Structures are given as C-alpha cells and as structure tokens.
Image (cartoon, rainbow, N blue to C red):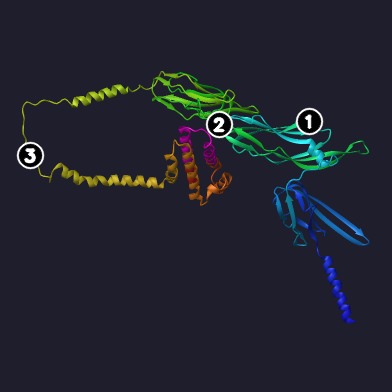
Amino acid sequence: MKRKFLGTLIILLAVQSVMAQVTFKTAVSKTELGLNERLRIEFSIDRQGGDDFTPPDFKNFKVLAGPSQSSSFSSINGKTSYKLTYTYVIQPIAKGTFIIPSATITYEGEKIKSNTVRVTVSDAIEIPEDPNDPRYVAQQNIHLVAEVSNLRPYVGESISVVYKLYVDINKVNVQNTREASSPSFNGFWNQNIEVKKWVAKNGTYGGKPHRFVIVRKMVLIPHKSGKLEIDPLEMEITAGVPIGRRDFFGNMLMNDVNFTLTSGKKTIRVKELPEVGKPFNFTGAVGDYKFSVTPNKTVLKANESALIKVELKGKGNLKLVKLPGIETSSGLEVYEPEHKENIKTTLNGLTGSVYDQYAIVPQTRGKFKIPSVGFSYFNPKEEKYYSVESEPILLNALQGAEPVDEAVVTNKKSVISNEGDIRYIALKSEFDSVIKEDDFFGSNLFYWLMILPLLSIPLGIYIGKKKQERDSDIIGNKRRKADRLARRYLSQAKKELGRKEAFYIALEKALHNYLKAKLHVETSEISREKIAEILRKKEVDQDTINEFSKVLENCDYARYTPSTDVMMKKEYENAKTVISKIDKQL
C-alpha cells in the first residue's frame, strides 16, 4: 500500500514538472517558397515574464517587416493558457536550402532557445493571373521605371536617370513606400539631384492613363568606354486593393498587400572618344564650352599685382575638367592659383563655370608678355573636337628695380676673356736659377701649418653647436625624416612620371606600402573607409585622412581618364606631402 502511494506521488510530480516546462518555439508560414515570395516567421513563448528577446541572424533573407508583438490569454474550464508572439515578414535573397537559427529569450533569469527551421528557396514563381488575387492586382497596376536620357553616350558625356513610380489609381491605392535597395553606378561619376517633394502628375504606362511621381533623379558621367550596367532600384510597396464592398459609412474596403518592385537593370553602351582629329592638348573636356584668359589690369605700379583668370564656361563635365596653366617669363613671380567653381546640376548635366585665378607680381620694371593659352574639348552633339586659344597678355610694370641686361653682362665677360688672350711679346730674356735656397723651416708655409690646428678649434666648436641645435629641433627632425621617408616610398612612382598607367599603379602601391610599414596592416586588401578608420584610431587628424583618401581615389580614377604630365607631377607632390603629414602625426 505504501509502495503504491509513493509510485502515484512520483508520477504526479513528474507530470507537474513536465507541465511546468516553458515552451519557446519557432513556426513559419511555409517551408518551401519561390525567390520572389515572402515568409512569415513567428517566435512564441507560453509563459508570462519573458524578456530580452533576441531574433536570429536572418542570413540569406531580408527583413521586410517586424518585429510585431502580440499576446493572447484564455481560460477554458479552469484551464488557462498564455502566448506571447514576435512576428517577422522576410523574403529570401538567394536560392538554396537554409537553416534559420534559434531565437533566444530570457525567462526567470535563464536564456531559452527556440528550435531551428529549415527552409527551401527555389526559382521565382509566376503569380497566377487571378483578377481576384489582391497581390496580382497590385503588381499589375503599380510599376517602377528607370528612364535614361541616352543609352549611347560618349566617355565624359552627361546623361540622366529618372526613376518614376506609375500607379493606376482607379484600381489600387499606394499607402506606403520604402527604398529597399539603392542602385550602384560602377564606371560612372554620379550625383544625386534631391527630390524634395513627390508631386503626382498625369501620364501613361502601357498605353493606359496612370498617375506618376518622380522618386529619384541622378546625373551620370561615364569615365570609361564599353558596356556598363546600372543596377536596379528596389522599393517595398504597401498597397490597398478594393475588395468590392463598402463599410457602414460608404467607404470602399481595402485588402492591404506588401510586395517589392524593381526598376530592372539598365545597360549603357559607352562610346570611346574618336582618335581622328583629337588635338595634342586634349585632356578629357566633353561638352559645349567657352574658354577665356583675362587680366584684371595690364599697367602696374610699384608693389602692385595682376590677377589672371583662366575660365571655362558652358555645359559638360565641368567637375572633371583640368584647366590649362599659364606660362610666364623671368621677372614675374607667380603664385599658386585659386580654384573656384560655380556649377549647377540639372537633368541636362552640369552647367556653369570654373576658373583658376593667378596672382602675378613683377620683380623689375618693364614690359612682360604672357603667351597665349590653348584649350581643347569634344562636343558630343556635333561629334567634333574644338581648339581655342586666348590672346597673349602684355603687362607693363612702370616702377621697380632696374632689369639686368644679360646681353651686356655676357659682352663684358667676353671682353675680359679676350684681354687675357693678348700676350706681351718679349724681345729680351732673363734666366733665373732653378735651385731654391729658401729652407722650409721658418717659411710662411711652416708658420701657417703651425697656426692651422689652433684656428680649427673654434670652427669645431661652432659646428658642434649647430649639430646640437639641429638634434634638439624635434619638429624639424620629424619633418626631414618624413620627407626622406616619402621620397623613399615614392621613388618608383617618380621614375614612372610621364607613363600614366605605370605611374598611378606605382603611386598607389607606394601609399599602401607606406601604411603597411607604419601600421603593420595589409591595406591593399581593405577599403578606403577601413583605412580611414585605422588612421583615426591612430589620432591622425581628419583633414590629413581626407587628403590621403583623395590621393588614393585619384589613383583609381585617373587610370581611366586622360592625364597630363602636369597632373601626374601634382599628384606626386600631393602624395609626398600627405605621407609627410601622416608620418609626423604617427
């Protein structure tokens, strides 16, 4: 009897223990779906008090909605139940069989894991043509379109891409939109034109009237020829589809559906600029331009300077144009130009002006000639090269030091030289004995050699002090060491000046080798953003980091665009300067 009672008690305790276990499970709406279908996944716990919910890593899926949280409580015949649910809507981004990992939640101080779920994703399926299916109705009446202004541009020619969302408002109602994936523009210089407000307009799609809004506008300039692809823009849409019934107040009842729209890929076939008729000084300017070189004054007084403006106006790839420099004769001091841009970006491209302004100061009085400056560009509309040349500029400095006449100096030297060639013709000869009776001891040379060591003592003291001052100049030593380091790493790039491809490869390699030596990191295998982050952690200032990133970017960009010796020399100097700056700060 006693044994029977103990057995019953053990069974009751075991049942109570099983009933007290917490259940946390994962459930999905389907385990097999197409690439363009959606999946609802729920994580449920049957006890109150669960917190710190952590979802799994939805690898190979993108989250479209969630988490949405809901709870339910019921009591039937004295038996109560509770369920707390976290719900997500996800969509696969790849085909295959995937395991969705466990979610975790904390209950009474302990972490509990849910079960894993296996999901198989196959090819995208076609939505059946069912006029009663709200999803089918929505996708048939909402369209995302990318309109490209020119599918066959030249290298350097501006084109525009306008993304429009077309809706048949008689059949569907768009309630919400979200950009799911932005397009990439590999091979293009690109700039976004801000769309401040969506304005609905009347239009047609497929021959039927629609309303449309412009959701995005871009200006692109290809910097290499060949077949280039623009990846699609993807948008997530929530649309309401009428179900044919009205509510008590007469309003049409809607069935809400969620789906993703894509603009599709666009292929741009970029034409190479023609070689026939290409001017020798062409550097990649494409558009319709006016070029000028103008001084603010030509007659200068004492200590006055003239400003020479080299300006380019018009429409084209203005942000990518390298303006030619000016040449000056001796007697004129020229300062680094001030670069200014006044450019407006529209769907027709870049319009406005850019200019370099030089400050010139005469060193002596007189007249100075600044030769004409040539500039060439390609007009893609006319498919023709144009070369323009400015007028020479004559500067007249009324005051200043007397100019040195080099011809006079040369003539004087010639006279002196000729004078030495005239010899006196001696009529009588006098002979001296070759035997010298002067002894070395007591001679002038003897005494000079005696005094010389004493004179070297103050000279040595002076040199020692100068060396001590130089060694104590920490900033100067750092600067000199950084300059030597920059020259060492950039030596190969300097040898390749004039050979564009080899120069920029050597320059980029030098920059990465420098960082590898200083940071002990293989920087050639990481992005510029990661390099910038490493330099920030090393307390390099942001301006220097930006300069370094700009040089790296220019190395990558310049391989596909026309480049001159002047541009390469400038990039070399920029790289040398930025290495010195980084080395001093590190």
Vertical placement of residue 272 versus 506, above or below: above
Q: Which residue is mark 2?
A: 272
**Structural distance between the alpha carbons of marks 1 and 2:** 39 Å
**Structural distance between the alpha carbons of marks 2 and 3:** 85 Å
Rate crowding at label 2 as few (under 14), some (14 to 19) or many (20 or more) other CA atoms within 10 Å: some
Secondary structure under the numbered disc 3 in the rendered image: loop
Residue closest to the eye, 278 or 158: 278
Vertical placement of residue 54 versus 391, above or below: below
Secondary structure under the numbered disc 2 in the rendered image: loop
Q: Quadrant of residue 268?
A: top right
Type of amino acid under label 3 = Val
User: Is tag 1's residue or tag 3's residue first in the polypeptide sequence?
Assistant: 1
Question: Residue at 76% of width from left, 33% of height from top?
Answer: 166
Vertical placement of residue 413 versus 498, above or below: above
User: Is tag 2's residue or tag 3's residue first in the polypeptide sequence?
Assistant: 2
- Left or right position of 199 against 170: left
Q: Which residue is mark 3?
A: 434
Type of amino acid under label 2 = Glu
Quadrant, the N terminus: bottom right
Residue closest to the eye, 298 or 356: 356
Residue 370 in picture, x, y percent from top left:
43, 22
Q: Magenta region's main secondary structure?
A: helix
Q: Which residue is mark 1?
A: 211
The magenta span reads 549-577
